[in-house]
Image: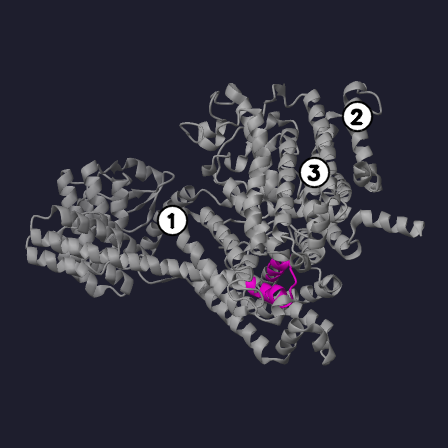
Amino acid sequence: MLTRRLFLSDWGGMTVLVLLLAMAVAVPYANLVLPPESPWHLSTYWVALIGKFLTFALLALAIDLIWGYAGILSLGHGAFFGLGGYAMGMYLTRQIGDRGVYGNPELPDFMVFLSYESLPWYWWGFDMFWFAMLMVVLVPGLLALVFGWLAFRSRVTGVYFAIITQALVFALMLAFFRNEMGFGGNNGLTDFKDILGFPVQARETRVALFVVSALVLILAYVASRFIVTSRFGRVLIAVRDAESRARFSGYRVEHYKLWLFVFSAMLAGIAGALYVPQVGIINPGEFAPLRSIEAVLWVAVGGRGSLFGAIIGAFAVNGAKTWFTTAYPMVWLFALGALFVLVTVFLPRGLVGIFRRRRREGGA
Amino acid sequence: MAVWLLIAGGSLHAETQAFGLEMPAADLTAETITPAVPVIAQADPYTGDMIDPSLLGNDPEAAELEAAATEDELMEEAVYEGLEETSADVDLLIQRLPEGSFNDRRAVAEELAATGDPRVPVVLTALVEGRLLATGDDPPRILIRAETGRAGRDALTGEPVDADLIASGRRIPVHNPLRNALRNLIAVATIAAPDPERRAASLRRLMRDDVSPDMLTYLDERVELETDPRVTDLLLTVRALARLNVDDPEQRIESIALLRGSLLSEVRVRLEATATRDDDPEVRDAARDALDSIESRIRFFRFTENLFFGLSAGSVLLLAAIGLAITFGVMGVINMAHGELIMIGAYTTWFIQTLIPEALSTSILLAIPAAFVVAGIVGIAMERGVIQFLYGRPLETLLATFGISLILQQAVRTMFSPLNRPVASPEWLSGSLYVNPILSLTWSRIYILVFAIMVFVALLLVMKKTSLGLKVRAVAQNRPMARALGVRTGWVDALTFGLGAGIAGVAGVALSQLTNVGPNMGQAYIIDSFMVVVFGGVGNLWGTLVGAMGLGMMTKFLEPHTGAVLAKILVLIFIILFIQRRPRGLFPKKGRAAEA
């Protein structure tokens, strides 16, 4: 019953999951086992790049969950992504220990530079992996809980919500740029050495991070699928399509929205935490409003309200971006802008919509 | 609020922009990443790209040093060129400088300073700097060695002399006590300089030291001769300061009463000293009393200044947001490309200025209608081309217009340059209105405040008094009914959007006088503009006015206590919380229209 609900009725999701699983096996094989001269060999650069895309796909999944199923457009999901990333970055920074430029075993380099006497309280505990991982989900979750509670309780919806989430991420960016915040100011956190005792730069670690990212994405997909196909999910869809009606039918609309929003923020936090060790830096640029809006575009391109569409969209847009920015850097922003316009005007259901329509026509 | 983060457009920035949205850590081999070095945070407010601090301006100290050196030389040049008749007495005094002891020299210098001869500051400056030479003739020839090179000129006539003669001259010796005395005397001598700025500067210099009562007669003379009212003020202040040193306590108290009105920091320092060190308790009390009154006046002017800054920031916000109040407030269209329409207006200003570079005032005035038309046309094209297909889907509109904003930015970047364009200001827009030493108001900000209010009133009239305004309101309230009554709603939509866009363009003309004009300038305003409209209440022009002024004031009154960035963050948090309390803003639409 559960299998049918989760998987069998979801042909697109099944395809994407199978592809992800295949990637989780094939990429390590192509990078670690195949010799470099083999045409099928995948360089570590590509492993890290695709690994990065996997974390973006997870962020897109988090956005699609609230946008596609509850009609909440957040233009500030980069806030949760960034906070998760910072939590991971803080753990990685503490792991540097006395190997920093100043060799201080207790304080990160930038704190020595800014002549801190001791570690600020909010850095306590980040030398422990479990604590940092807890914070990766707790900090974004708490922020989402407080922010969402305030917003949904007073029925801030639609574009108003979009605008204040943008204000939130913007305020966070300004705050993290401040050196006084104790998060490394505009340089952010970088120069990482180890994660759980393994060197971050090593090929094997990168492959392991890749596999973990793929597995987390698969798990998150299954969990999200479970939520949206449950009774809870059906109420959400009712809220999305007719909020007042759902409320008058006796559902506590704001609770449904709030819990989904918190879950989505946690997914975004995890995505950020997986992103940081793979790119080796976290800085306030992650909080730039443009980044958050771009992530919404991934979902729009893939097709909102289908979950797997978000994953496809994240890969498609980021793949195109990587190609454009190396081949035609001047054209990229034109292409991105045109993509925004074309997708919203001509493809309201995204790439997934094309296939769905064709399938329906073929089936009829 | 718009000034808190600079958008710089250096070449480095342009490059990161061309690669646009690529990860900051595109370089996955993190070994090369440099360790944390704190730099003053300067970030592009939208993309978060870092801006190289060196692009944000030259080293001000170096520039000042350079300017000072040339200023001295220029003064020297000007003095000797303007020399008409020379007084033989002054010539004789100058020739007596090499004689006798340091004290004799000081006496001669004092006599010289009191003559008011234009050559005196130059000669004394050269003496302080060890560039004043005397030949062995009788009477000796006095020469000034140039600051650079080995040539020089005759101190009496200004005629250039060759290096050989300079080499034969002996340096007239000075020691440190004499140097200090001379610096004061130079200030005294410069009180008579032809340039009022120099006179004012030398008076400010005199205030810093104890002014001797011996100078009183000379100061009296200068007060009689002075024509510039600002310099007269300073002269009177210096005279009052000199009187602080006379023996008669009555006179001291009198001069303190005169100083009550002054806001100069030098006067406050002297009054502090008098309040603590004067022998006479009555004088001390008077000084203390005067200080208190000055303090309270300073507080008042600081408050006025903050008020002005707040109004000014508010007027910038108003200009940026008022077009949005039309497109978002009346039509319900989230136009993320609004900032780019402002940018187009600013570029129009720049373009017209390059067409007629010799007529700055005309070009600015011409730019206002031109920017309205250009931005309006772009707006109408946007509405007809994209937005009309998306009515009723606000979130999609948001994404589509964001895409348009990226395209417009990149188009400007490709057509012109990723670098900032220089937009000049006409004379009446530069400089500031000097009220007193604490308070001076920038003319450009005053004009922009007035301009913003004018635009606001004009828009209000269009909306309330014209048939277009009537139709716009009708369509906003009830579209099917308006259509049934024969209003061409599609056409009204296009014109409304064009109006909002055109006003954004006009805002761009004003903002080009305040900030850099570059492809990214629009992004600085978009979040602020939305905050203003949402805070003031959607669909209400008065709400936009109150919202803009309120947020401007709030930012500027927070800034002295928290710094610009934190003030900005606090205002954002305030708005986020405010929206929770009043989701429809300060002045919400009421009734049936509010549900639409």
Give the residue type that dot 3 points to: Leu
Magenta part mainly helix, strand or loop? helix
Label 2 marks which chain's residue? Answer: A
Residue B322: horizontal and vertical position, in percent? 56, 65
- Chain ID at mark 1: B
- Mark 3 residue element: helix
Q: Quadrant of the C terminus of chain B?
A: bottom right
Q: Earlier in the sequence, mark 3 or mark 2?
A: 2
Mark 1 lies on a secondary structure that is helix
Which residue lies under the disc numbered 1? B561
Looking at the picture, do discs 1 and 2 lie on one chain?
Answer: no
Q: Which residue is mark 2?
A: A25
Q: Which mark is residue A58?
A: 3
Q: Is residue B138 visible?
A: yes
Q: Amino acid at mark 2?
A: Val
User: Looking at numbered disc 1 in the image, what kind of residue is underneath it?
Assistant: His
Name the front one of labels 1 and 2: 2
Q: Is residue A37 magenta?
A: no
- Give, as a single range, the part of the protein colored magenta: B321-345
Is disc 1 surrounded by few (<14), some (14 to 19) or many (20+) residues within 10 Å?
few
Image: A76 above or below B345: above
